[in-house]
Amino acid sequence: MNKIDYTITSPRFSGEVTVTFTDGNCSVYNALQAELNGKQRNWFLSRVILPEKDFLNALQQMGCFTVVGARQELTFDMFWDRYDEKDRSSKKKARSKWQRMSKEQQLLAYSHIPVYFRNIPSGVSKKYAETYLNSEIWNN
């Protein structure tokens, strides 16, 4: 699986937009760290559906973006750091489950973490990392 994260900034908005492409298609779009107006938000949303090459061409044609990309393979340590439940979770059990998952399931699990965290009710602890993986919350 080929994965690349792009961080996009511009003098036309504050903050940054992050877009992740996996095997040439957008798998994660995050504008939560950017202050976009409606027109800007719609512009991004209409272009992240494009293949990676076409998305990058659209950014270049606008001429007002700075794009930084980092190609990487999704690893267990990336999941472990993002999930960040090191005190209560078993790294050994979580790694064992991770290694048995397909690359697609790993990507879904990794990408869903912020959504899961946002939806945890107040006063409820997040699940252990191994429970998160075993219960496949991203499929619910």
Image: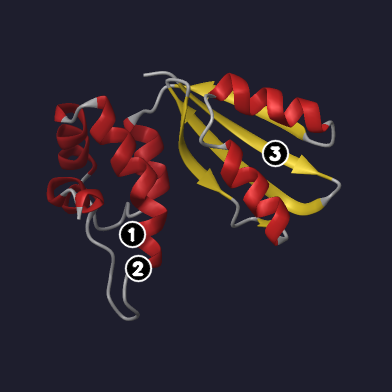
Location of mark 3 (residue): 8
C-alpha span from label 3 to label 2: 26 Å
Numbered badge on residue 83: none
**Along the viewing direction, whichever of 99 and 7 lies nearer the viewer:** 7
Q: In this view of the protein, which residue sits in the foreground, 61 or 130?
A: 61
The colour mode here is secondary structure
Bin the neighbour count of mark 3 within 10 Å (Cα to Cα): few under 14, some 14-19, many 20 and up: some
| 30 lies left or right of 23 | right
> Which quadrant would residue 108 be assigned to in this image?
top left
Q: Which residue is mark 2?
A: 119
Total residue callouts: 3
Measured in 3D between alpha carbons, the distance from the residue under mark 2 to the one under mark 1, in whole angstroms, is: 5 Å
User: Measured from the top left, where is residue 37 in percent x and y?
Assistant: 73, 60
Contact between marks 2 and 1 (CB within 8 A): the answer is: yes
Q: Which amino acid, mark 1?
A: Tyr
User: How dense is the environment of label 2, judged by Cα within 10 Å: few (below 14), some, or many (20 and up)?
Assistant: few
Q: Is residue 8 left or right of residue 133?
A: right
Identify the element where label 1 is drawn.
helix
115 sits to left or right of 93: right
The quadrant in which the C terminus is found is: bottom left
Q: Amino acid at mark 2?
A: Asn
Q: Estimate the x, y position of residue 20 in percent, counting from the top left.
A: 51, 34
Residue 35 at least partly seen? no
Of residue 70 and residue 29, the one placed in the foreground of this image is: 29
Q: Is residue 90 visible?
A: yes
Label 1 belongs to which residue? 116
